[in-house]
Amino acid sequence: MAGHRVPLLRMGLIPILLQGAGARLARQNAVGSRESSSQGKLNLTQSQALPSRPFHYPQPESALHCGKVSLEVLAKRFGTPLYVYSADQIAERLAMFQQALEGRDHLVCYAVKANSALAILKLLAERGAGFDIVSGGELERVLAAASEALDRVVYSGAGKTAGEIDLALKAGILEFNVESEAELELLAARAAKLRKKARFALRVNPDVFAETHPYISTGLREHKFGIDIRQARRIYKSVAGNRWLEAHGVSVHIGSQIRSAAPFGAAVERVAKLAGQLRRDGIALKAVDAGGGLGIDYHAGSFDAAAKVQEYAAAVEQALGGFEGRLLLEPGRFLVAQAGALVTRVLQVKRNGRKTFVITDAGMNDLIRPALYQAHHEIVPVRARAGKARAVDVVGPVCETGDFFARERKLQPVEPGDLLAVLDAGAYGMAQSSNYNTRMRPAEVLVEGAKARLIRRRETIADLLAPEIL
Ligand code: LLP
């Protein structure tokens, strides 16, 4: 690990910690990035990678920190690969939504699928969040972590089983987001059986195009999600007399990692219009659920999260028009993605002809986003080395060519034993991990101020073999 350290301070490149900072610091940071680009290539990637993330180098030549905690220390204590999350940033992101919507009745229902760690659910529930779940399993997580928040749960998903519906009815959740007529019939039957009234919203498909990766775009008629908005009014009317169903709301979700506010506005406008028609029909909905999907900036450079949320909230509020009920939102990624990093150790640096491969102890089973969506994640050294940046492939040890975190990425020199941090890994990282190649899933650590605590221990081989029968 010896080696010349990069003189960050002299180059004016100490990244600014954005925690709790909001727009003002984001602007300062943007300026910092511009300065850095004019002063030298060496640190460009590194200095620009950090705005709007809780990860920073507090001193010249020091290790990358999450808040006040060194990632080097965490890696030594808990091993690698390791997911590290900032509780402070998660709380801050939730507060951004709550503040932007201060003037109206609203509930932020965190999309559990983005990161379902119990400790994260608990911290969000304590700060007033509800939850968007998509399975009985996720409901069990809310039960385990924050049972006081069960009446703040909305249940989405295109294929709910009778057992899952029963569980949610007994738990007394806020709303079932129903995706088909058949599901509505099933919900009515289960509610009648259990003698528990089911509050429902139809998840409508607004036929709005959201520019994002095709795998995570959901709001077009050709997608499997939701009910054609043109059919919704008829369906609401058809169940108006059912004593076990309460038409509580209407919901929409057009996709994920959507960077512009416009498609959200367009979708909510259509939904609000439907709510208006239903009111005239004598069906007064209490809630509009605008779904999740607000995107972040995975690339280097400045990103003003608070301004983004304000822009989004303004577009949604404007689109709601005269709707007077409650606004529900289901953000996932925006709350947790940038709060997390995957810390990994370099096993080998291998040269094959012109190509250099940096082989890490984390693989596609730990973070599949690059392999699955060709997603970009910034990668920074936990402790920078001096030297010229070179294009490398950062790859994992899994036996697939698709097992990569970055290709032809300019990285400062790295050596075996060095630590790297894959940024923006807090959402759909651990949540989409697997045991492929019989690899144990990483441990997870939550950092709050100066304290770090283990929120999930590393899996053991005994954990993996336990369900199997010889
Ligand atoms: N509500 C519903 C009904 C959803 O299907 C989703 C995400 C969300 C809310 C939360 O969306 P978010 O705010 O996180 O964008 N694995 C992919 C993302 C899949 C999103 C699926 N649905 C990725 O890694 O990019």
Image (cartoon, helix red, strand yellow):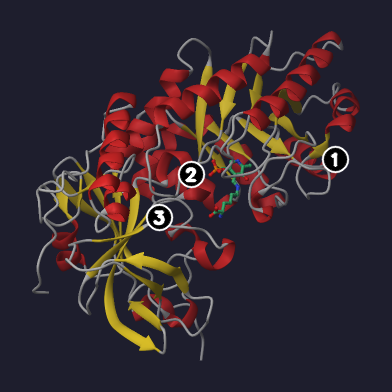
**Residue type highlighted by circle 2:** Arg
Determine the secondary structure under disc 1: helix
Near-viewer residue (229 or 147): 229
> Residue 47 location, x and y as percent?
27, 49
Query: Distance from label 2 to label 1 (Cα)?
Result: 29 Å
> Residue 203 location, x and y as percent?
73, 35
Label 2 residue near ligand 1, CB within 8 Å: yes
Determine the secondary structure under disc 2: helix
Side of 183 where 113 appears, left or right: left
Which residue matches tag 3? 425
Q: Are marks 3 and 1 in contact (CB under 8 Å)?
A: no
Q: Are marks 2 and 1 in contact (CB under 8 Å)?
A: no
Near-viewer residue (311 or 283): 311
Determine the secondary structure under disc 3: loop
Near-viewer residue (365 or 349): 349
* Mark toward the start of the polypeptide (2 vs 1): 1
Query: Distance from label 2 to label 3 (Cα)?
Result: 10 Å
**Residue type highlighted by circle 3:** Ala
* Mark toward the start of the polypeptide (2 vs 3): 2
In the rendered image, which quarter contains the N terminus? Answer: bottom left
> Residue 14 location, x and y as percent?
17, 44
Which residue matches tag 2? 333
Residue at the image point whose x is 44% and y is 58% from the top: 429
Q: Is residue 196 visible?
A: yes
Near-viewer residue (139 or 30): 30
Residue at the image point whose x is 49% and y is 17% from the top: 101
> Residue 155 location, x and y as percent?
62, 40
Tag 1: Cα neighbours inside 10 Å, few (<14), some, or many (≥20)? some
Which residue matches tag 1? 181
Q: How many marks?
A: 3
* Mark toward the start of the polypeptide (3 vs 1): 1
